């Protein structure tokens, strides 16, 4: 009996952490703005031209530290001068004979993107693009990475590369060739001894070309230097069918629904 009484007293003195907390819960309430005397909506009106120019002015002000002269921000334009696309069968024959061939080139900004097809002689293989912008007084290399097995073949792999022409090269030519290393043997694609060439055009040459084109296409003004904006043209496109939800639109435009009936019956 004495032991049961001790166990009962010990049960009454268990830590409070085991008991369910009955702290007062905060009730959540929703209040609307109008009940507090505030507006439910906020309206702002913009003019199309004001929005455009205000954004440009804010952007130029916030990025004034990034603004530089056009000469420092100019990006050269690249032109492919001696690359010719061939039929797919010709490319495959060329790869099987020479083990490597450039099959696609594209200039984008100051970069040249290309695809190189190689004969799958062994699993371990390396493909590099060696290029120069000073007529081979110096050169650099960029790797090409495996992309896929050429569709319809069982022995030709495709590699992709990206060659970035330095912004300091404002004019001249960039030449490159491709090196394919497999089984400790080198194979080259140098475009039959002429290399693949990219012409580098500076911004000055582009500006000169643009200015000349503007002079040829700009007509003399006959309105005493008063600039007038062209009147907008309103073009109404007649619907080929007349859905039920658009019939009221036809009535509002003083046009009957029967006007579109022949179009529906004709199967339009």
Image (tube, rainbow, N blue to C red):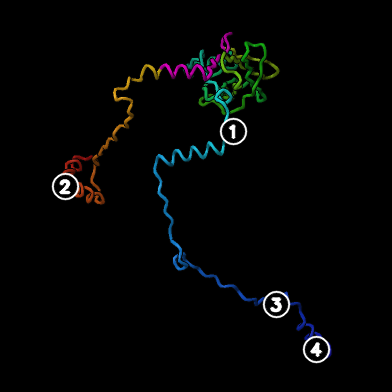
Residue 167 percent location from the top left of the image? 59, 22
Give the residues in magenta. 191-212
Q: Is residue 184 visible?
A: yes
Circle nearer the viewer, 4 or 3 = 3
Mark 1 vs mark 2, CA separation in Å: 61 Å
Residue of label 1? 66
- Residue 5 - label: 4
- Residue 256 - label: 2
Q: Say which of 139 and 207 sits in front.
A: 207
State the image quarter where residue 148 is shown. Answer: top right
Name the residue located 76 percent from the left edge and 77 percent from the top edge.
15
Is residue 97 rendered to the left or right of residue 249? right
Mark 1 vs mark 4, CA separation in Å: 83 Å
Say whether disc 4 or disc 2 marks the residue closer to the N-terminus: 4
Residue of label 3? 19
Say whether disc 1 or disc 3 marks the residue closer to the N-terminus: 3
Say whether disc 1 or disc 2 marks the residue closer to the N-terminus: 1
Q: Is residue 160 visible?
A: no
Mark 4 vs mark 3, CA separation in Å: 21 Å
Circle nearer the viewer, 4 or 2 = 2
Tell me the SS state at disc 1: helix
Name the residue located 44 percent from the left edge and 61 percent from the top edge.
39
């Amino acid at each position: 009996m004495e032991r049961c009484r001790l166990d009962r007293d010990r049960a009454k003195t268990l830590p409070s952490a085991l008991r369910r907390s009955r702290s007062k819960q905060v009730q959540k309430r929703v209040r609307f703005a109008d009940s507090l005397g505030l507006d439910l909506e906020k309206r702002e009106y913009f003019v199309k031209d004001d929005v455009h120019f205000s954004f440009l002015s804010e952007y130029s002000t916030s990025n004034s530290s990034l603004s530089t002269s056009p000469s420092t921000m100019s990006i050269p334009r690249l032109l492919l001068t001696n690359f010719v696309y061939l039929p797919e069968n010709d490319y495959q024959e060329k790869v099987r004979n020479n083990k490597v061939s450039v099959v696609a080139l594209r200039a984008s900004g100051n970069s040249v993107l290309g695809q190189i097809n190689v004969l799958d002689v062994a699993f371990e293989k390396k493909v590099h693009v060696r290029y120069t912008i000073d007529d081979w007084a110096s050169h650099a290399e960029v790797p090409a990475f495996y992309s896929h097995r050429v569709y319809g073949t069982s022995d030709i792999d495709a590699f992709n590369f990206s060659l970035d022409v330095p912004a300091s090269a404002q004019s001249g030519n960039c030449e490159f060739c491709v090196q394919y290393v497999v089984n400790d043997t080198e194979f080259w694609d140098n475009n039959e001894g002429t290399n693949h060439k990219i012409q580098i055009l500076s911004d000055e040459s582009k500006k000169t070309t643009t200015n000349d084109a503007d002079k040829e296409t700009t007509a003399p003004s006959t309105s005493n230097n008063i600039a007038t904006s062209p009147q907008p043209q309103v073009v109404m496109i007649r619907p080929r069918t007349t859905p039920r939800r658009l019939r009221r639109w036809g009535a509002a435009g003083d046009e009957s629904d029967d006007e579109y009936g022949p179009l529906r019956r004709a199967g339009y």
